[in-house]
Image (spheres, grey):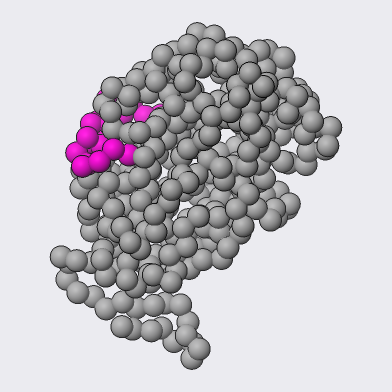
Amino acid sequence: MSLETSDTQAGGKRIEAKDLREKNRKPLQDIVPVRTPFVVYVESTNMCNFKCTFCPTGDKDVLEESGRPNGTMKFAQYKKIIDDLKEFPDKLKLLSLYKDGEPLVHKQMAEMIAYARDANIAERIWTKTNGALLNPKTNQALVDAGLSLITISVEAVNAKGYLDIAKVKIDYEKFKENIADLYARRGNMDVYIKIVDTGLSDEDRAKFYADFQPISTHVAVEQLMGWSYSNIKDFTLGKKPDTYDGLPLIEKIACAYPLYVMAVNWNGTVSLCGNDWAHKTVVGDTNKESLKQIWEGENLYQFRRMMLEGRRGENKACGDCYYLKIVPDNIDAHREDILKKLSVGRPHVPFVDAQPTKRGLPVVR
């Protein structure tokens, strides 16, 4: 994740969410197996103080149907996870101290950031917040802890909008004041402020930029995202946007994320995607093994094989995943070659392409 430095005196630079992505991406088919994951998400909590209409965490019925466990990570467990990351030969490109929920609900969030900073296991440390719990004391703690980037998700441009979309009452002017305070204290930290278009009028957009561009380093209007496990609910609220973050929607057979991403859930289990809100891609448990053992282990290998052979429909999170359409890496043409590289040192199993051929049959090689 990288951002160009903007003229902070003139306020934040207007971007698209795609501009947050790493610019110097290397073709995965040339560098697998990756010996250290590029990105690791660590979820301090998946509890949230908002109930946004477009978010799985805000929908009690969806959570119950999916069977997702809810809770908050203990600090001792978090320290074990960060210590595990020291076993990898390289630094992470990005440590994301956010996955689902509102990270600032965790009372030790600043301590978590500082512990990761001192461990020196990542080039950048990022979190995302709805901003409602920001205040001068918390703001200074986040800056002092060494956070590289904070994303603030604005849900509406007035108190009524917050009640409609996030189902909460807020003091909108105080909310802006606390964000302005963070911006003033930020030091070298990037402050990216974005709003999701749930039906913004031209006046709403103009007000968003007027309110937040002067107190951000980067600012954007994003589109609704369909998430993983997309068949459980239409998280785009019927809008069906052409794109979520400025990248085109491209149908793909295989997802590249399991090749370079890990996500540690609040309870220590390890998923393979920051968008697996339902915990359906779990391949290990940090309570029983190290992250490196999981990264190199049989469960993750078999998950990658499933993905590369075109069998992602076997997994509830991946089978009908909106987010796959905007994953920037398209490895479909290289699936067999990638699997061969990942299989070195393992018993030979023929590549079986589950995608139908012209005759409607799998291809076995």
Q: Can you name the residue that lies furthest to the top here?
A: 137
Residue 314 in sight here: no
Vertically, is 184 above or below 230? Answer: above
Q: Nearer the viewer, residue 57 or 243?
A: 243
Vertically, is 213 above or below 138? Answer: below
Q: Residue at x 50, y 55 (%)?
A: 328
Vertically, is 179 above or below 25? Answer: above
Residue 310 included in the magenta stretch of the image: no
Residue 278: percent from left, percent from top: 47, 47
**Left or right placement of residue 55 versus residue 100 in this view:** right
Q: Residue at x 36, y 40 (%)?
A: 93
**Left or right placement of residue 13 versus residue 80 in this view:** right
Q: Can you name the residue that lies furthest to the bottom here?
A: 359
Classify residue 13 by image quadrant: top right
Residue 252: percent from left, percent from top: 51, 66
Q: Residue at x 42, y 35 (%)?
A: 96
Residue 84 included in the magenta stretch of the image: yes
Q: How many marks?
A: 0
Residue 212: percent from left, percent from top: 68, 24
Residue segment shown in magenta: 72-92
Q: Residue at x 62, y 42 (%)?
A: 16
Q: Nearer the viewer, residue 61 or 179?
A: 179
The quadrant of the image that shows the C terminus is: bottom left
Q: Nearer the viewer, residue 28 or 241?
A: 28
Residue 350 in sight here: yes
Residue 192: percent from left, percent from top: 57, 30
Vertically, is 206 above or below 244? Answer: above
